[in-house]
Image: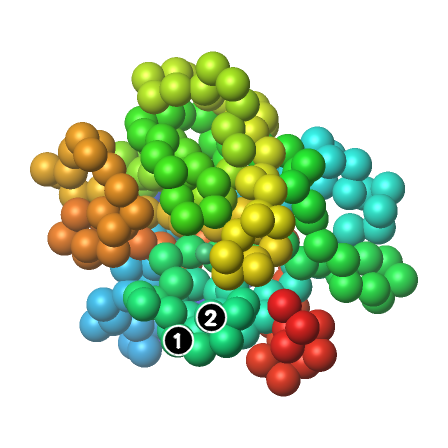
Amino acid sequence: MATQLLNAAAEIETIQDLLGHNWITTTQRFFRHPNALEIVMNPKNISTSDPTKRMSIKKSRFTEMLIEENGLDHRGFENWIFCNGMLFDSPDKWWGDHGLRDYPHEGVDLCLYRDRSGKICRIDEKTRIPVMQSGMIKAMFKDYLGQAIIIEHDKMGRNPGRFISFYAHTKPHAGLEAGMMVKAGDIIGTLADTSHSKAHIIPHLHFSLGRPSKSFSYEGFVWNAIRKPEKIMLLDPLPVIDWPYQALDAGESVCREL
Ligand SMILES: [Zn+2]
């Protein structure tokens, strides 16, 4: 029945649009019919426990802003490249001994991209980092390659409640501090120069997204705080970054050489 309705040439919109609610699952769609109101759910996902499947995530202009701010369009930026270990939840390291991480990857690592000629390039320590969406800087602390900056947003797309974006391995602009308001596209700093890092790791932006719990506090925030699911529910940033990408196997020479 639902399928038949969906196949009819009729307007489909989210149930949220209609009911004014602020929460919707990405697998629910509302079909408006003169006398009917129907929620269609994908049976595969009804019992999913994956939080990203239960959220309507707004895509951001993050990559676009990064390209513009750094003139990467002139360098022919086409798509992001991820080696094994750079994506969310990966257990692997993409640097050093290419062994296992201490903890599954808490976000994505942005450093490689392919240009129009097909060449794989990397962003360097001069890369200026734009803020994904408006919010307030809530915490800054040292990480093992530079500094991490945590920004809290009132909401993410239509999802109510606090949301954080987390930019790590950076060199924040002088004067940047917790309590400051920032707007989408504001430049908060550059990538940290990692040439002296013991791990011989190239400059990259670690980017995480998460929803802090109601009781969460930024007091004494350190990296390990994002590893506690009862404090922050981490999400895969890729759908939010919303830009074409290619994931390479660990065996690809460009990845082996990192
Ligand atoms: Zn990372």
Answer with the quarter of the image where residue 257 lies. bottom right
Number of on-image labels: 2
Residue sitting at x 84%, y 50%: 76
Residue 90, given in percent of the width and then of the height, sits at 42, 70
Q: How many residues crowd around disc 1 within 10 Å: few (fewer than 14), some, or many (20 or more)?
A: few
The amino acid on which the numbered mark 2 sits, given as a three-letter code, is Lys
Q: Nearer the viewer, residue 61 or 20?
A: 61
Q: How is the image coloured?
A: rainbow
Question: Element type at marker 2?
Answer: loop
Residue 246, given in percent of the width and then of the height, sits at 65, 68
Among numbered discs 1 and 2, the one appearing first in the sequence: 2
Residue sitting at x 44%, y 37%: 147
Q: What label sits on residue 100 in the rendered view?
A: 1
Residue 191, given in percent of the width and then of the height, sits at 58, 40
Can residue 34 be seen at all in this image of the molecule? no
Q: Above or below — where is 39 with respect to 65?
A: below
Q: Above or below — where is 252 with respect to 125?
A: below
Residue 83, given in percent of the width and then of the height, sits at 59, 70
Residue sitting at x 58%, y 80%: 250
Can residue 134 be seen at all in this image of the molecule? yes
Q: Nearer the viewer, residue 46 or 228?
A: 228
Q: What label sits on residue 93 in the rendered view?
A: 2
Q: Quadrant of the N terminus?
A: bottom left
Residue sitting at x 83%, y 64%: 119
Q: Nearer the viewer, residue 6 or 219?
A: 219
Q: Quadrant of the C terminus?
A: bottom right
The amino acid on which the numbered mark 1 sits, given as a three-letter code, is Leu
Q: Is residue 85 left or right of residue 117?
A: left
Q: What label sits on residue 160 in the rendered view?
A: none
Evaluate if marks 1 and 2 touch, with contact meaning CB atoms under 8 Å apart: yes
